[in-house]
Image (cartoon, rainbow, N blue to C red):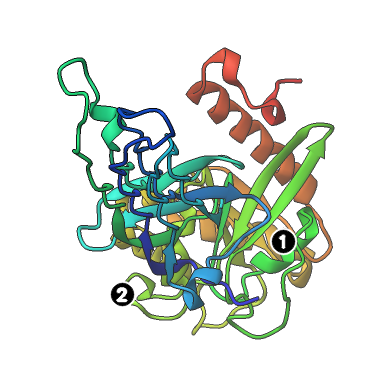
Amino acid sequence: MKFVDEATIEVAAGDGGNGCASFRHEKYKEFGGPDGGDGGRGGHVLAIADDSLNTLVDFRYTRRFEARRGEHGKGSDMFGVKGDDVVLKMPVGTIISDAETGEVLFELLQPGEQITIAKGGDGGFGNMHFKSSTNRAPRQKTPGWPGERRALKLELKVLADVGLLGMPNAGKSTLIAAISNARPKIADYPFTTLYPNLGVVRVGPEKSFVVADVPGLIEGASEGAGLGHQFLRHLQRTRLLLHLVDMAPFSEEVDPVHQVKAIAAELKKFDPKLYAKPRWLVLNKLDMVHAAERESRVKDIVKRLRYKGPVFEISALTREGCEGLIQKIYEHIAQVHRDAQPATEIDPRFQPG
């Protein structure tokens, strides 16, 4: 399925039904009194977060959603039936904004979360609503209120604990396939990944975290070069970034240090908050480096980067070093989660022990 993470739609809630002006007509009752019922409420337009969805593609082809209006009130004290609601299923992580002003209106962050994005109009009052001791034969009635109408922009930011960064062919897809249940396309040419992949990494019983792989970045990505700039937003909700570096034999034209600095610069241009997130250096494809050269090559890269954070040496293909990396990631995510949430609200995935 084609990955679509943006869409613009129009929603229209139902108008309320009109109130009714009616009087009771029964045999032997000369003054039956008012019996006009109120109109029914118009249908709402609702959005519900569905964790089985991972794309907004359904909203690319159907762009207008309209709920039914409420029925008009009737005589004999009969109120109008409310209009049917329209329920739109959206992926978890969808941001709903006003298409004209850009104001963020709603965010769907929890599976099953339901919100009203367009409220149906209230029904009008029938004349029985105006009956009183001084107004025994009211002829007043009111029309139904119009339902809300909105132009909305939908934007999907995937919810993941860890995000993978790196140049095309750095081995991100191979790594996420090795450590999680994701099965992305893997090939020996650049830009194999064309849309984000999510994978759940199982660390132990009831212990897991979610990792996201986005298309490879190149220099100029924040200004539109390559594919990665379209998906950088998916890394904004992560708690940790893993910067994968290809350690395979490189030439003078391909310097991993320059590549790391280029991607870091793109992150800073795109979003300073994203740049400030914890970012670990993961040196990949060590199986393609001669054992005698590994230590010197790692030291050279770290020294030229002046990097002070955690460094991991792995081979995603052979899984060498992957288990240690997984454990350190889980420990970090669990600690961040404990620091951010009250003790009574700790996610069971990140319980200590």
User: Nearer the viewer's eye, disc 2 or disc 1?
Assistant: 2
Disc 1 on helix, strand or loop? helix
Image quarter in which the N terminus is found = bottom right
Task: Judge from the rendering whether residue 101 lies leftward or rightward of residue 39; answer left or right.
Answer: left
Looking at the picture, tell me which residue is in the foreground, 223 or 237: 237
Task: Judge from the rendering whether residue 353 lies leftward or rightward of residue 113; answer left or right.
Answer: right
Q: Is residue 182 above or below residue 326?
A: below
Looking at the picture, tell me which residue is in the foreground, 185 or 300: 185
Q: Amino acid at mark 2?
A: Glu
Residue for badge 2 = 223
Task: Judge from the rendering whether residue 31 lies leftward or rightward of residue 230; answer left or right.
Answer: left
In x, y percent, where is residue 325?
71, 45
Looking at the picture, tell me which residue is in the foreground, 21 or 14: 21
Q: Amino acid at mark 1?
A: Leu
In x, y percent, where is residue 145?
26, 47
In x, y percent, where is residue 83?
46, 50
Q: Is residue 286 above or below residue 309?
A: below
Residue plotted at (83% across, 35% down): 204
* Residue neighbourhood size for the residue with mark 1, other residues' Cα within 10 Å, grouped as few (<14), some (14–19), many (≥20): many
Disc 2 on helix, strand or loop? helix
Q: What whole-number distance in Å separates the C-alpha atoms at marks 2 and 1?
A: 27 Å
Residue for badge 1 = 175
Question: Is mark 2 in CB contact (under 8 Å) with mark 1?
Answer: no
Image quarter in which the C terminus is found = top right
In x, y percent, where is residue 96?
38, 53
Looking at the picture, tell me which residue is in the foreground, 235 or 289: 235
